[in-house]
Image (cartoon, grey):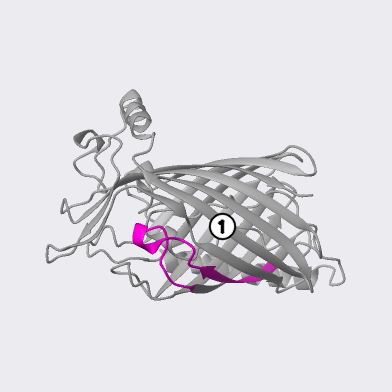
Amino acid sequence: MLSCIFKRCQLVFSTSVLLSGLTLAGASSAQVNFGGPIPMRDPDPFHLLFLQFQPQTPDVLSTNKERYRIQFDIINNLLIPNPIGSVTIDNEYQRLMFVWSRGIGDQTELQVNGSLLWRDGGVMDGLITFWHHLFGFPADAIDDPLGRDHWPKYRSILQVVNPQGKTIINYGNGFGLGDTSITLKHPLIQATPRSALAARLAVKIPTGNAKLFLGSGNVDFGADIDARYSEGRDISLYCNIGEVIMGHAYDIPGAQPHMQQGLLALEYHPNGRDRYILQVDANSLAVRTGNSFADSAAVTATFGVTHIMNRHLALYASYSENGDIHNYTLPGFSNIGPDISFSFGAEYHP
């Protein structure tokens, strides 16, 4: 699945380079406007611990230009696969994210990303159960074969038992800072209205409390390539592909040394104010639990909309699903991930 996404990304990159070579080589850098992928990547409890390249466009802010973003995410997790008891993730995360970006010269953009995290029983269990019952949706897919109705609502359990029967991860509620990411972005080709290609380098600072499972407790490094290609006036395609080298997470049993991340997004913008997005992001394993299903590739599908209020402000919202949306028959579209997540944000350009 990941290799398929990477091949598609490489095709987009090659197309972007070719088209840019054929377009006006002397054109000025494209102005950074609102739109592009929703800045939401698989936020399951394990991937939240490590560096994540949030989806974005390859367009770079010009010198001294700034951008501010605030985002609130509600993430409902339910993963209790067979054998029952080996992995039990039944909780909710709320994340308040703050992002500051600035063009610092030499066609380079600096971005700082920080967050507050809450892990608790949440508020969505009853609403999700009502939704399932109202439309007759099954709630006993392979990620939870006993079904939602089997478990008490509003639990906060994050537990992994290894094949030898030893509990290696066991957390309830948690609150505190998440880790902080610092990113530099620089174009690889000259941006045009048709296409753009850029690279990001990032470091994650361990400001999250690893003892509460709110961070990995170590520094991560990563590199990412972002591409954009516009088809006509109304359609834009985006691709992100990255590699993360994770510092040793001493307090996280089963943490992996590296991780691949990818994203494909299709944006429809029928007018000057509205942007509609369908995107699929994929992540390789972050923490090995020993359960083959829980350790499969993390893939989530996100449906989002951005509305531009004026030249300074845009609002956006999105809804993300795991493989429950199709009963795990299309793992390349969505697979392991939060049961459902919602994101709401505002982006401000001074």
Location of residue 68 in the rendering, given as x and y in whole percent from the top left corner: 69, 51
Position of 162 compared to 252: left or right?
left
Q: Report the number of discs.
A: 1
**How many neighbours does mark 1 have within 10 angstroms: few (below 14), some (14-19), or many (20 or more)?**
many
Residue under the image location 28 percent in, 68 percent down: 253
Position of 270 compared to 116: left or right?
right
Where, by quadrant of the figure, is residue 260 drawn?
bottom left
Q: Is residue 40 visible?
A: yes
Q: Check the picture and name the quadrant holding the N terminus.
A: bottom left
Residue under the image location 24 percent in, 45 percent down: 144
Magenta region: which residues? 197-219
Location of residue 295 in the rendering, given as x and y in whole percent from the top left corner: 29, 62
Position of 169 compared to 83: left or right?
right
Could you say which is closer to the camera, residue 62 or residue 21? 62
Magenta run includes residue 212: yes
Magenta run includes residue 285: no
Q: Is residue 332 visible?
A: no
Where, by quadrant of the figure, is residue 211 drawn?
bottom left
Taking the view exactly as shown, the residue that stands out farthest to the left is: 164
Could you say which is closer to the camera, residue 190 or residue 157? 157
User: Compared to 236, does 72 lie above or below?
Assistant: above
Location of residue 305 in the rendering, given as x and y in whole percent from the top left corner: 61, 40
Could you say which is closer to the camera, residue 29 or residue 325? 29
Position of 336 compared to 264: left or right?
left
Location of residue 165 in the rendering, given as x and y in whole percent from the top left corner: 12, 62
Taking the view exactly as shown, the residue that stands out farthest to the top is: 134
Q: Quick one: SS at disc 1? A: strand
- Type of amino acid under label 1: Gly
According to the picture, the residue beneath numbered tag 1 turns out to be 114
Could you say which is closer to the camera, residue 37 or residue 109? 109
